[in-house]
Amino acid sequence: VRLGGELRLMKLWMWNLGWLVLGLAWLGPLPELAQVSFAAHMTLHMAVVAVASPLLAIAASGTRLDPVRRVPSLFSPIPASVGELLIVWAWHAPGLHHFARHSLLGFVIEQSMFLAAGVWVWISAFGGSAPRSPSRSGAGVIGLLLTSMHMTLLGALLTLSPRLLYSHHHSVWLEPITDQHLGGAVMLVVGGIAFLAGGLWLTKDLVGDGEKLSSRLAPASFQRHFGSAPHE
């Protein structure tokens, strides 16, 4: 399916913007700041998973770069959301979190897995044939909303916890507990809103498809029950 000129241009902008966000996140000050600030670490995490990943995935969807068109069985939205949940929660366990914040190897592995998990979820929801099939859009809604829920839950846990969940906070600007709460708020707001917005976008597509189907079926249904269409 050939993409229209405006759609191709929009996807090109999204593709370039996604790589720009990723470059700023990884090559800017955030990786160094993340070693001394949990809030900076969480901002980096959200930049990769909730900003760069959807931009890159949606830009690639429906093009020759879309892996869903070649191996759709590996890109089912609901299993992808479960896989992303396991990756995110595992890397926020104290041991792996410490490894990622204080080891270059740990940081590279963590960030690579975050990017892969984010793209996996978003391309599973938005990829495939163009236009998307209602079944994939419906599964995408469920997958993205599940992801939004677990992001919100983890963010709320970090924000509302009355004690430190990590013993290696060394923020030079904030009290450790305040730093943790701020990081949780970043995840709660950015992560929750990004995945919720993606789910609502696909819901809009489903509603539009339903309205189009109803408009096509209505005349046929009328003729089946009442004979020929009424004349004015």
Image: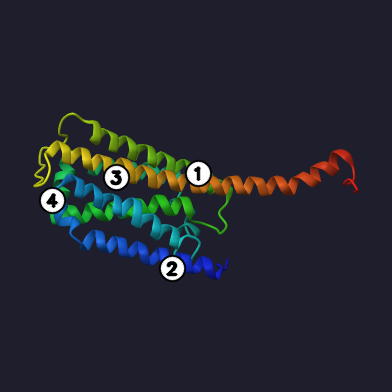
Instruction: Tell me which label, 2 or 3, sits earlier in the chain.
Output: 2
The image position of residue 75, as x and y in percent, is: 44, 51
Mark 4, residue position = 35
The image position of residue 53, as x and y in percent, is: 36, 55
Mark 1, residue position = 139
Instruction: Tell me which label, 1 or 4, sits earlier in the chain.
Output: 4
Residue that protrudes farthest toward the top in the picture: 162
What is the distance, in whole Å, between disc 1 and disc 2 at their CAs?
Answer: 26 Å
Secondary structure of the residue carrying numbered label 2? helix
Secondary structure of the residue carrying numbered label 3? helix
What is the distance, in whole Å, between disc 4 and disc 3 at their CAs?
Answer: 20 Å
The amino acid on which the numbered mark 1 sits, given as a three-letter code, is Ala
The amino acid on which the numbered mark 2 sits, given as a three-letter code, is Leu
Instruction: Tell me which label, 1 or 2, sits earlier in the chain.
Output: 2
What is the distance, in whole Å, between disc 1 and disc 4 at their CAs?
Answer: 37 Å
Residue that protrudes farthest toward the bottom in the picture: 5
What is the distance, in whole Å, between disc 3 and disc 1 at their CAs?
Answer: 20 Å
Instruction: Tell me which label, 3 or 1, sits earlier in the chain.
Output: 3
As drawn, 228 above or below 29? above
Q: Report the residue at 47% width, 60% height from top.
A: 61
Mark 2 closeness class: few <14, some 14–19, many ≥20 residues within 10 Å: some
In front of the other: label 1 or label 2?
A: 2
Instruction: Tell me which label, 4 or 3, sits earlier in the chain.
Output: 4
Q: Is residue 98 left or right of residue 26?
A: left
Foreground residue among 120 and 226: 226
Mark 3, residue position = 87
